[in-house]
Image (cartoon, rainbow, N blue to C red):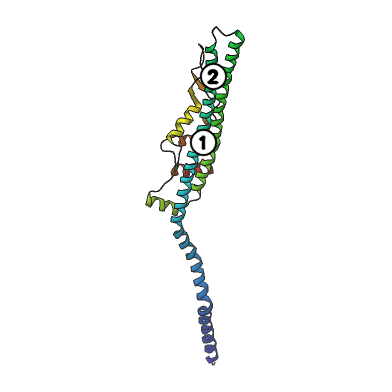
Amino acid sequence: MDLAPLGEIVCWIGGAAVWVFANLGAPILTGAVAGFAVPLAFRWESTPGEVRQHNREAMDLNEDFRRFMSDLGRQVQGTFRRLESEKRVAEIKANIQDEEPPLFDRLEHIGEKYRWEREAKEAMDDALWRYRDEALRKRGRFLALAESESKRHERRRRSRNSYPTLAISQEARQALDSWRSRPNPFAEFDGDEDRLLADFDPTGTEFDLLPLETDQGLTWDAAKQAILAADR
């Protein structure tokens, strides 16, 4: 049997296979490797920039929070200054009189005193509600930043020891405490409360906000743990 034609066929198939790989296989393989390696390299290259961007956003959250608390504190103080000014004017009018004011005037003054207290407590309550809502928004944004990062971001942060936090300032904490309880500037009679207390503190049931009122603040690690706990 003549095997020469069979050998020629085998050689032809081998040559065709070499041509196919050289012209099609190599580019396909190269494209597959590039399709995997290039995005991976891009992600690693973009990691430092993403960490810096998230740090800037965390700083902006803290600065925006500081301004919010400062503005809110000025509004509450403005309400108290107005009410205390009304009280001083009423006292001056009462002292000008040569004799004890009529019963009607005394009752009117008592009614004014309770109005001042009521308006003052309303300002305290409103400030606490507004703080609660803003704090929840800020915390949610901070958690979203932490959730958006992966292990490569964590390695970058660990190598730089770069971890942002979210907290309110010492001044803001003092203002917050004064919205919950403060000396009563309108107390006049025996039995009057010597302190004004908020009727309802909505932050009392928001335990997730407690870290914001500490020196340490809400840490990056605590934010990560809160995300994991929410996913369970």
**Residue at screen point 53% across, 92% down:** 4
Question: Along the line of sight, which residue is nearer the eye, 45 or 199?
Answer: 199
- Amino acid type, callout 1: Asp
Percent position of residue 100, x then y? 55, 7
Question: Along the line of sight, which residue is nearer the eye, 151 or 96?
Answer: 96
**Circle number at residue 71:** 1
- Amino acid type, callout 2: Val
Is the residue 212 above or below the residue 96 in the image? below
Where is mark 2, residue-wise?
Answer: 89
Quadrant of the snapshot with the N terminus:
bottom right
Is the residue 56 above or below the residue 88 in the image? below
* Badge 1 vs badge 2, beta-carbon distance below 8 Å: no
Q: Mark 1 to mark 2: distance in Å?
A: 27 Å
Q: Nearer the viewer, mark 1 or mark 2?
A: 2
**Residue at screen point 60% across, 8% down:** 103
Percent position of residue 86, x then y? 55, 21
Percent position of residue 26, x then y? 50, 75
